[in-house]
Image (cartoon, rainbow, N blue to C red):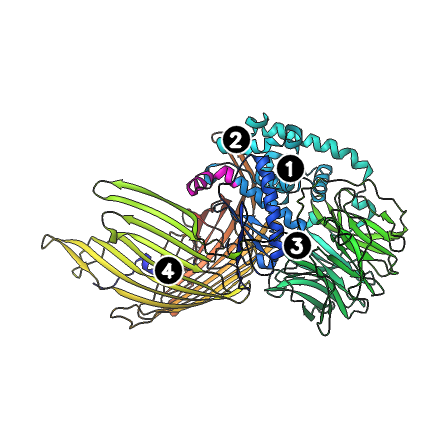
């Protein structure tokens, strides 16, 4: 019997088991971590070299937090919870506990199935304490709601209605109670009528769910008692619906709670309105985040002559540095676009720092570039990089030029210490000014260049109690001697900037509730308040003549750049009453000793599992099961799936995949067996149509070596080895017998080389900006067995996403395919995945290509119904598209169009068009398209395409 191709064979030849990530950015392990672990009464803490001080701190904070949460939530852990610590955010981004990419905005996470807590150190021990406490709350929540048994976790996750604010709000409340960030957000939200109702908060994402959720829990705790928080979660486990649990716990519906909570905030903040300044009253706004549709315009730096301002913005989704006029805010140029290249992988949007050289010809900033942070010095006029300063630290922040422009001072994080460094620009010689556990940040040179002023939470004297997280300004000689405290302590105090004569320092402090500008007279150490706004201020910067003060201001839910004229001409105002936030705190012992330290083991356990079992007489048992396993650090991962038949075990399908991930390169391996059954209708030599039963068996394996070049580019080298055997069964009318025939197995050895790039940014249903492409070449190796396939494949897949405006984007995809050789493969065209408006697999050809053009836009913001079904769906998006494609076996035979009686009509060129909707239903993106095809003479009937999966 001649060898046959089925769809299963074709797709297996085209797409391997290990090609689970056709695109996607790369998570690169730049370091070989040597993991150790220690046990405390309730935790197993994993760490590596250089983290000893962090582990001592984390152990004490975790245990102290445990006992507080045990009392608040009335719950005990039944087993130790793993805590995995990373030295810096750059190291944290390399974790394999989750395979998802970790962005700079992620401060830590707790995963639901194994309750592992994963956190980085980012320079501040107070932030470190906050994140430990925050993630530990999640561990308690998961343990209360879902339990530690895997089956209960799987069942509860898909049947329990828990809004995100319910989880994140409690974590924020328990970890900090209240702070200036929360005060700033709530003040602004109430005054500018941006407070999200609790009903709408159920569907919200982002910063609001943290801060408004925190405020709601504070209201419940203050009104009904702190014990109600634990009672609420235990009731939620039983009721499986938050509103029902709320009603049962405090007797209020969501609507009633929302009314009481929002009224309490209005009573608190509205009386303050006349006592505070609006940003527009004290300064001129140069950007407008509401019109731009973004959230962050931050880290301004004014040129020495006061004419230009450089700042960081996210107005086009990608983080970038813009240069604007200091007169009217007109955009002069785009200096740097970040997050699209390995050179500027991240511009540190959440801890930014830009500075001008004293002569105004250069700009300096720090950026993540692969495994390290680099200080770039750029020619402002032509955009060329003049110097790339490598400080050999885990992270680098806040670079600032010396007055002579020959060196820079910056904050560097290394081995759990945030210290002040000076680097010589020409020689790159590094001088470390401080070396201790305190959070030293925001250093600047005095105009004379002999001293450096910085913010720190260091203790007042060597024998005093260290109150980490309480900051003051300090001065230090350029040679690292003579540290002197200049101000009192606040929970947030920093961003110092000198006046031109060196006699004044402008800085930011939250002394009175939110971050405002204050003035320090250096000689007398007297402090005066410069601003008193609702939302908050950060990153002040002065022109050389002191006549222009530029800063970032928070209002209406976003940050903008403002300029204040003649700031030192304002009347001197004494600081107001200090606000006490009563933030959570853990007293730590500096002499705490680590005990029972040992090398970390693998510790394999189940990540997730699912399946079913059925029985039918005559067929026996059939079970389908999927299991994923990994070690505690996620470096070794197994995936096993099987479809087991008790009647004949040889008919069972199975797949076993293994990934080895701790190195820079990734290695994958897989073995499988797959059985497929078809009813086919071949024609006999006599022209008779036969009715045949085809049984197809595929067995084999694959190896994949993934070689990342940087976050955005990689090579994939893969080899697939498998066999295909087909058995035929049909009734022979002449002999009155059932004929059985089994073909000899055919073997495929298929090496594949792929080159992949991905810089895409994702929205709710798919990519919205950037580009992705992949080029692959595969060549089977004939002659390895008696019967083999002999073919070659080359294909390219190029995708581009262009942001038009907020929510609107234009997506294009071009795909080209060619196969040649004795057993060349045919590519199927038609259906939802390539050319819509045609039935699935309507056309086949050894040469294929198609172009998708798609306009993506917001369609329905919210769909809410009560009858006939209670529905509340948000974020339904729309698409309008045109698909163009064609297939052929020989390019010379391809006819794009032919003449018709009326004009011309498409021949081999296939064109479809239509419209559709996209809905993110949590587990997948639902896509529904209405499409037609046309040949220019006529339009086809309507085709409906339904599929699951993200947009291309």
192 to the left or right of 619: right
Q: CA distance from mark 3 to mark 4?
A: 41 Å
**Residue 36: percent from left, percent from top:** 53, 57
Judge left or right: residue 939 versus residue 30. Answer: left
How many numbered marks are there?
4
User: Please, which residue is most extreme toward the bottom here?
Assistant: 427
> Which of disc 3 and disc 2 is earlier in sequence?
2
Label 2: which residue? 235
Residues shaded magenta: 142-156
**Circles 1, 2 touching at the beta carbon (< 8 Å):** no
Residue 552 shows in the view:
no
- Closer to the eye: label 3 or 4: 4
Residue 619: assigned label: none
Q: Secondary structure at mark 2?
A: helix
Picture disc at residue 670 = 4
Q: Label 3: few (<14), some or many (≥20) within 10 Å?
A: many
The residue wearing badge 1 is 196
- Residue where numbered disc 3 is placed: 314
- SS category of the residue bearing label 3: strand
Dividing the picture into quadrants, the one containing residue 230 is top right
Q: Residue furthest left?
A: 735
Which numbered disc flags the more N-terminal residue, 2 or 4?
A: 2
Q: CA distance from mark 1 to mark 2?
A: 25 Å
* Secondary-structure class at tag 1: loop
- Can I make out residue 892 in this image? yes
Q: Earlier in the sequence, mark 3 or mark 1?
A: 1
Task: Give the Cα distance between marks 2 and 3.
Answer: 41 Å
* Mark 1 vs mark 4, CA separation in Å: 49 Å
């Amino acid at each position: 019997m001649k060898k046959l191709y089925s769809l299963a064979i074709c797709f297996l030849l085209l797409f391997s088991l290990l090609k689970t990530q056709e695109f996607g950015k790369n998570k690169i392990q730049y370091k070989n971590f040597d993991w150790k672990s220690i046990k405390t009464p309730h935790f197993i803490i994993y760490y590596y070299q250089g983290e000893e001080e962090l582990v001592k701190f984390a152990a004490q904070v975790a245990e102290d937090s445990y006992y507080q949460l045990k009392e608040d939530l009335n719950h005990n852990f039944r087993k130790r919870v793993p805590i995995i610590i990373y030295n810096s955010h750059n190291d944290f981004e390399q974790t394999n506990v989750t395979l998802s990419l970790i962005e700079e905005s992620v401060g830590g996470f707790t995963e639901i199935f194994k309750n592992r807590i994963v956190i980085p150190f980012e320079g501040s021990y107070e932030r470190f304490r906050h994140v430990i406490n925050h993630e530990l709350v999640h561990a308690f929540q998961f343990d209360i709601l879902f339990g530690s048994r895997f089956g209960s976790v799987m069942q509860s996750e898909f049947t329990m209605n828990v809004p995100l604010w319910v989880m994140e709000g409690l974590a924020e409340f328990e970890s900090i109670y209240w702070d200036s960030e929360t005060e700033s957000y709530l003040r602004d939200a109430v005054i500018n009528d941006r407070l999200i109702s609790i009903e709408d908060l159920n569907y919200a994402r982002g910063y609001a769910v943290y801060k408004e959720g925190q405020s709601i829990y504070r209201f419940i705790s203050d009104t009904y008692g702190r014990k109600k928080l634990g009672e609420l979660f235990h009731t939620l486990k039983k009721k499986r619906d938050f509103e029902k649990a709320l009603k049962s716990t405090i007797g209020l519906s969501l609507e009633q709670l929302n009314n009481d909570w929002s009224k309490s905030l209005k009573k608190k903040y509205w009386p303050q309105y006349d006592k505070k300044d609006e940003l527009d009253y004290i300064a001129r706004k140069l950007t407008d985040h509401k019109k731009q549709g973004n959230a962050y315009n931050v880290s301004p730096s004014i040129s020495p002559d006061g004419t230009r301002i450089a700042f960081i913005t996210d107005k086009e989704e990608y983080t970038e540095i813009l240069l604007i006029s200091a007169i009217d805010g007109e955009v002069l140029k785009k200096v740097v676009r970040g997050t699209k290249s390995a050179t500027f992988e991240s511009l540190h949007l959440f801890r930014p720092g830009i500075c001008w050289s004293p002569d105004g010809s250069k700009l300096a900033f720090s950026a993540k570039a692969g495994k390290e942070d680099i200080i770039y010095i750029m020619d402002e006029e032509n955009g060329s990089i003049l110097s790339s300063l490598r400080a050999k630290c885990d992270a680098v922040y806040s670079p600032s030029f010396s007055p002579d422009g020959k060196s820079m001072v910056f904050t560097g994080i290394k081995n759990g210490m945030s210290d002040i460094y000076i680097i010589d620009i020409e020689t790159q010689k590094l001088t470390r000014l401080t070396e201790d556990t305190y959070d030293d940040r925001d250093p600047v040179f005095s105009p004379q260049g002999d001293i450096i002023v910085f913010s720190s939470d260091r203790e007042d004297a060597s024998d005093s109690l260290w109150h980490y997280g309480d900051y003051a300004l300090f001065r230090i000689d350029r040679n690292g001697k003579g540290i002197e405290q200049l101000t009192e302590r606040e929970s947030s105090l920093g961003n110092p900037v000198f006046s031109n004569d060196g006699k004044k320092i402008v800085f930011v402090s939250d002394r009175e509730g939110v971050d405002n500008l204050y003035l320090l007279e250096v000689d007398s150490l007297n402090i005066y308040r410069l601003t008193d706004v609702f939302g908050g201020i950060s990153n002040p910067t002065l022109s050389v003549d002191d006549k222009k003060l530029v800063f970032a201001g928070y209002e209406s839910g976003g940050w903008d750049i403002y300029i204040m004229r003649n700031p030192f001409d304002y009347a001197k105002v004494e600081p107001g009453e200090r606000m006490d936030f009563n933030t959570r705190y853990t007293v730590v012992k500096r002499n705490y000793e680590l005990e029972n330290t040992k090398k970390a083991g693998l510790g394999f356990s189940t990540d997730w599992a699912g399946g079913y079992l059925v029985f039918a007489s005559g067929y026996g048992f059939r079970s389908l099961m999927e299991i994923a396993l990994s070690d505690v650090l996620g470096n070794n991962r197994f995936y096993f799936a099987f479809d087991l038949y008790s009647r004949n075990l040889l008919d069972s399908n199975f797949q076993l995949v293994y990934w080895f991930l701790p190195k820079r390169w990734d290695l994958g391996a897989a073995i499988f067996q797959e059985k497929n059954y078809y009813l086919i209708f071949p024609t006999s030599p006599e022209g008779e149509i036969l009715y045949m039963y085809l049984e197809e068996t595929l067995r084999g394996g694959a190896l994949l070596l993934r070689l990342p070049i940087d976050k955005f580019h990689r090579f994939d080298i893969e080899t697939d080895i498998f066999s295909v055997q087909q058995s035929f069964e049909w009734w022979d009318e002449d002999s009155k017998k059932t004929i059985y025939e089994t073909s000899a197995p055919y073997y495929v050895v298929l090496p594949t080389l792929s080159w992949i790039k991905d810089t895409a940014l994702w929205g709710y249903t798919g990519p919205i900006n950037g580009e992705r492409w992949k080029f692959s070449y595969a060549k089977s190796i004939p002659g390895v067995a008696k019967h083999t396939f002999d073919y070659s494949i080359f294909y390219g897949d190029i995708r581009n996403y262009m942001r038009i405006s907020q929510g609107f984007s234009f997506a294009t995809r071009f795909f080209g395919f060619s196969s040649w050789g004795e057993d060349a493969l045919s590519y199927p065209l038609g259906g939802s995945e390539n050319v819509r408006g045609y039935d699935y697999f309507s056309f086949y050809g050894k040469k294929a290509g198609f172009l998708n053009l798609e306009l993506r836009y917001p369609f329905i913001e919210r769909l809410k119904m009560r009858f006939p079904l209670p529905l509340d769906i948000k974020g339904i998006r729309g698409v309008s598209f045109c698909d163009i494609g064609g297939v052929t076996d020989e390019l010379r035979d391809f006819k794009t169009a032919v003449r018709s009686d009326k004009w011309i009509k498409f021949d081999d060129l296939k064109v479809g068009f239509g419209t559709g909707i996209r809905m993110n239903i949590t587990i997948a993106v639902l896509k529904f398209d209405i499409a037609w095809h046309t040949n220019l003479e006529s339009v086809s009937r309507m085709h409906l395409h339904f599929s699951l999966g993200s947009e291309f």
